[in-house]
Structures are given as C-alpha cells and as structure tokens.
Amino acid sequence: MSTVGNHLAKAAEDAANSAQERIASFDRQLADIEKKKADIEANRAALRGSLQRLANFPVKSGANYLCPLCWVDEGKMSPLAPVASDNRDDIFRCRMCHYEAVIPG
C-alpha cells in the first residue's frame, strides 16, 4: 500500500476508534437516563398513593387528631400532640415529622 493509502487507512481506523468511544459514552448516558427515569416513575407512583391516602384521611384515631403530612406522605397514623399556647390558638405538633397545626381561636 502507498504512503497515501497507509495514511488514509490510519485516519479511518482513528475515526472508527473515536466512534467506538463515543458509542460507549452514549451507552453510559443512556443507562444513567434509564436509571433516572425509573427513579422518577417510582416517585410518581408514590405520589399517586399520596392522592389516594388523602381521600381516606381519617383525621382522628380515638381521641387523637392525626398528622396530615405523615398520613398523606407515608400512610402513617401519627398522633398530633397539643402544645401550650400563649393566646387563644389551638396548637398541635407531630412528634414524627414536626408538622405544626395552628388553629386560630
């Protein structure tokens, strides 16, 4: 093969090697995107569960009011504890997530 032919064959080989590296990079990017997509779909499904839990929020369990955030976010029946107030407001706090409800008095 001529010098020109050798040079062109080497350039073609270099281009093919570069393409192979780019393909590997795209494969990694696609794998990352697929993982992110799966994470988004899982979070979306969890939020759909939150909407269903909202429809079934019991408000009270026995004499205790329940934390709306714990119920909607995780389906947990966390009681709200009354908190002393220096005015006429009723205050309730969740010991789990620290949500605080202030009911004007």
Image (cartoon, grey):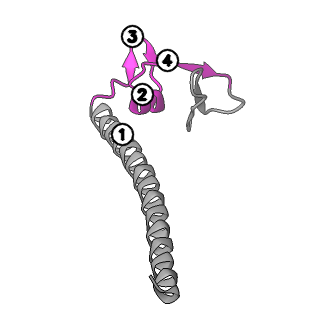
Q: Which mark is residue 62?
A: 3
**SS at badge 4:** loop
Side of 99 where 63 appears, left or right: left
**SS at badge 1:** helix
Name the residue tied to disc 1.
Answer: 42
**Dot 2 amino acid type:** Glu
Q: Earlier in the sequence, mark 1 or mark 2?
A: 1
The residue segment tinted magenta is 56-84
Q: CA distance from mark 1 to mark 4?
A: 28 Å
**Dot 1 amino acid type:** Ala
| Viewer-nearest residue: 93 or 42 | 42
Q: CA distance from mark 4 to mark 2?
A: 14 Å
Cβ–Cβ under 8 Å for marks 3 and 2: no
Residue at the spot x=48%, y=59% of the render?
25
**SS at badge 3:** loop
| Viewer-nearest residue: 16 or 48 | 16
Residue at the spot x=60%, y=20% of the render?
95
**Dot 3 amino acid type:** Gly
Residue at the spot x=42%, y=18% of the render?
77
Q: Earlier in the sequence, mark 4 or mark 2?
A: 2
Q: CA distance from mark 3 to mark 4?
A: 10 Å
Q: Earlier in the sequence, mark 3 or mark 4?
A: 3
Name the residue tied to disc 2.
Answer: 74
Q: Residues within 10 Å of mark 1 (few under 14, many from 20)?
A: few
Q: Nearer the viewer, mark 1 or mark 3?
A: 1
Q: Earlier in the sequence, mark 1 or mark 3?
A: 1
Cβ–Cβ under 8 Å for marks 1 and 2: no
Query: How many numbered dots are placed on residues in this image?
Result: 4
Q: Nearer the viewer, mark 3 or mark 2?
A: 2
Q: CA distance from mark 3 to mark 2?
A: 20 Å
Name the residue tied to disc 4.
Answer: 79
